[in-house]
Amino acid sequence: MPIRLSGMISGLDTDALVKELVSAYSTKKDKYVKQQTKLEWKQDAWKSLNTKTYSFYTGKLSNMRFSSNYSKKTVTSSNETKAKVSASSAAVNGTQKLKIDKLATTGYLTGAELQTGEGISKKKASYTGSTKLSEMEGFDGNGGNLTVKVDGKEKTFGLTGDMTINNVVAQLKDAGVNASFDETNQRFFISSKTSGAAHDFSLTGDAKGIQAMQTMGIFALSKADEAAYAATAASDPENLAKNEYLKVVVNAANEKLAAKNKALNDEISYLENMTGREETLTNNITENDTAIREKFGLDERTEINSSKLEGLKATLGTLADDATDEKKTEYNEKKALLDKAEDYLATREKYDTYRRNLGGGDAAAGATTLKAQVTANEETMAANTELTKSTYTTSEFDSNGTIQSLINAYRTENGETTYRDLLTKYQGLKETAQSIVDRTSTAQTSSATRITGENASIRLNDATFTSNTNNFSINGLTITALGVTAEDEPVTVTTETDVDGIYDMVKDFFKSYNEVMTAMQTAYNADSAKGYEPLTDDEKEAMSDDEVEKWEKKIKDALLRRDDTLSGIIYSMQTAMNQSYTIDGKTYSLSAFGISTGNYFSTDAKERGSYHIDGDKDDAVSAGNNDKLKAAIAADPDNFVAAFSKITGGLYDTLTKKMSASSVSSAYTLYNDKSMKTQYKELKTTISDWEEKISKYEEKYYKQFSAMETAMSKLQSQTSSLTGMLG
């Protein structure tokens, strides 16, 4: 706004006069500003109501449409010290007999107490996690090897004198078992991570390894350990070594193929992204090249290639240093065109290279060619993996052409050291295992104790079920076995429909419905705000903040009063909820379940659309009535669910139609939001036009007053001169 010094000669308050002269126009502008403010508030009121309704529509209402959501069950166990039972919606009503024969156990090894000294001087050791194996009494040089088998995996690790107790614990954990060393009790503790027979572990060693286990107090043969030694003793080292070697070879081959496929898939992604873009790229290049020729004054036949671009860039040097705005603008425009051209040419060159490599064709054809290569590689990988699923004798192994082909390729890069190492390993294991099998009956266990992992076993209605844990999932029941039952004292499991659960669902649904309906009724039946309009800045200055807040609240509360759109929504929702449905020859409505709205004449306007459940202790309106709803659920849950899901489904369909998109409203919107946005933009334009008109009139009046001031100044000057002459 310009700074004006006026009224210096005339002494008039020019600003006040101009303001008064344009006041009629300002009043018209203020009228539109108030309309715009009121419309904005109305949009906010609708947004708030729409959000509340949409949340109800997608949440509680949507869930209540489906009968599966009502499938709640309660289950009781006659002996919760033996079994805890829960039920899902799939559980069958009725009474069942449960017997628990065995609980699941976890494979566990409790090491012997470590001691030092001999005879009467023997005492508990004082080893710590940092104690080296060589410092433990009885450890003999190289500790040999230990092998852990668990969950289908096997790991062998060596023991040396420099290893600490903590190192051994870490190796055991890495092999897949739980392990720890208790310094207070001087014992190792080793266990499976999961209970059950299939998850039991075996801990075995070679000759030196067994001596080391005895030193650490962890040598205790379980059935799994004995089986592992016996299987190794009976095995053929050469067959084992060659079959394991094949797995190494196949893994190496498949890793190479997987790397190739990753690169191919990257190329496929590029080509698929180029599909359909070649024409667009060509058009962009043509359009940009034309613009470059025009900007740089080139002949229309000039080719814009990489060499030409370098030359054109060189011509921009002087423009870049020019300080004038006009030259800088020219530089930026030219540089932008050249940068685009570089990008386009790089993209075209990359794409053309792909096409040449693939023998021509478009992007889609190229992608198809590469996908065929990927598929072929995947088939080869699958065939390679299939080879490792069979166990070959040495003669079968050596005569298989495919295997020999893979091995020849592997040997070219890696030699045969892997096979030789494996053969040495298996020969050594066989010799050690045989010696252990020969003396297992007399082997020292160092007082370590071993519990074998076993499965839990139960009988439900005389059918036997097993599990590696004490948890069972059977036909909708989740059973946790806690103790073994006597043969003549089974646990009785009773499953019933959860009447209270369904009742609470319905009650919770109406709580949400009533919140939405109350919000609508409150807005529709609000007190009139006739005579109240949004305040201008000048009007606000004349009032206190509290007065302004109350004034605006009065208007906002009444924005949707007697609104036709809102009235239609309320009517449609109430109509949907009042519908009756016939199930198995019987007619059901909300009133049949003791659910109704309050008396129209004695109920406050904002509560007239809310529902009350007879016998609901939390509802003062209906708490004293007989509870029909819970009785109906208990008497015939299937028919109740069928009827109520239809009632809520009808309301859902009604709101779906009300919130469908149209020319005046967006999807999932109750009100005409598109129309309001258009109206808001129109008001904004109108206000802008009036502001421009007011500004022009103000300028006009200021010029007139300025001319008057100038004339009066000249008159004053002439009068002063004349007075001086007449002295």
Image: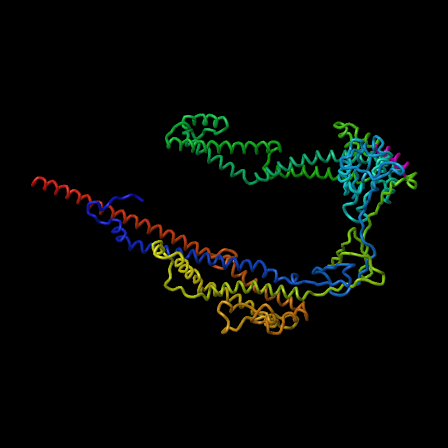
The total of numbered circles placed on residues is 0
Give, as a single range, the part of the protein colored magenta.
425-436
Residue 399 visible? The answer is: no
Q: Residue furthest front?
A: 120
Magenta segment includes 354: no
Q: Residue furthest left?
A: 726
Q: Quadrant of residue 372?
A: top right
Q: Would residue 590 be found to the left or right of residue 75 on screen?
A: left
* Secondary structure mainly formed by the magenta segment: helix
Quadrant housing the C terminus: top left
Quadrant housing the N terminus: top left
**Depth order, front residue of 250/444:** 444
Residue 337 against residue 196 in the figure, above or below: above
**Residue 131 screen position, x and y as percent:** 78, 34
Residue 76 visible? The answer is: yes
Magenta segment includes 429: yes
